Image (cartoon, grey):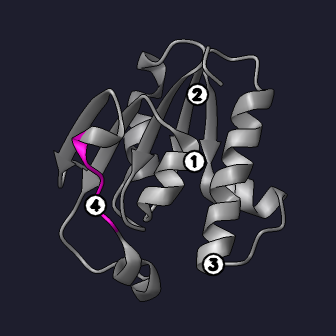
Amino acid sequence: MNAKFIILIMGRSGAGKSTYYNKYKDSFESHLYLNNDSVRQSSDNKDFSIQGRLNAAKEMTKRISNSENELVVVDMICPLKEMRKIISPHMIIWIDREFESFYKDTDKIFEPPTEEECEIFVKLFNTV
């Protein structure tokens, strides 16, 4: 994965991650887009325990590694710092909207990302 540049678009459920991606996807050069909902569905991962979430992050890294694209955009809630460490993004775009999502269990464990977790950190407020 070292030769790849990984952008993680993250935030709570319903924050606008996919909307943000769809709005700006043409500005990304040739890239692989990985949406966590789609990846979970195709890998039959319906486990939202901590281990299930970590497995989802590991599945992302597997798909990133198997990709020939140099740029990978990951669209994922990614509520745990440990998940972000597994994915190891170079850039985090955090869609930070103040609201309760549909998934209270995810809201309870959500650990806000920090600038120390990546090379480039962008925090967007209520942008979508």
* Marked residue nearer the N-terminal end (3 or 4): 3
Q: Is residue 21 visible?
A: yes
Quarter-wise, where is residue 8 in the image? top left
User: Mark 2 or mark 1: which is in front?
Assistant: 1
Could you tell me residue 37's position as x and y percent? 64, 60
> Is 1 situated above or below 49?
above
Was residue 114 drawn as part of the magenta stretch in this picture? yes
- Residue shown at the point (47%, 35%) measured from the top left: 89
- Residue shown at the point (27%, 40%) measured from the top left: 116
Q: Amino acid at mark 2?
A: Val
* Marked residue nearer the N-terminal end (1 or 3): 3
- How far apart in space, not on screen, are marks 1 and 3 (Cα)? 17 Å
Work out whether residue 96 or residue 66 is closer to the camera in this orientation and state it: 66
Could you tell me residue 28's position as x and y percent? 47, 18
- How far apart in space, not on screen, are marks 2 and 4 (Cα)? 22 Å
Tag on residue 72? 2
Quadrant for the N terminus, please: top right
Residue under label 1, please give it.
Answer: 86
User: Mark 1 or mark 4: which is in front?
Assistant: 1
- How far apart in space, not on screen, are marks 3 and 4 (Cα)? 18 Å
Quarter-wise, where is residue 55 in the image? bottom right
- Give the magenta range: 111-115
Residue under label 3, please give it.
Answer: 48
Tag on residue 112? 4
Was residue 49 drawn as part of the magenta stretch in this picture? no
Quarter-wise, where is residue 13 in the image? bottom left
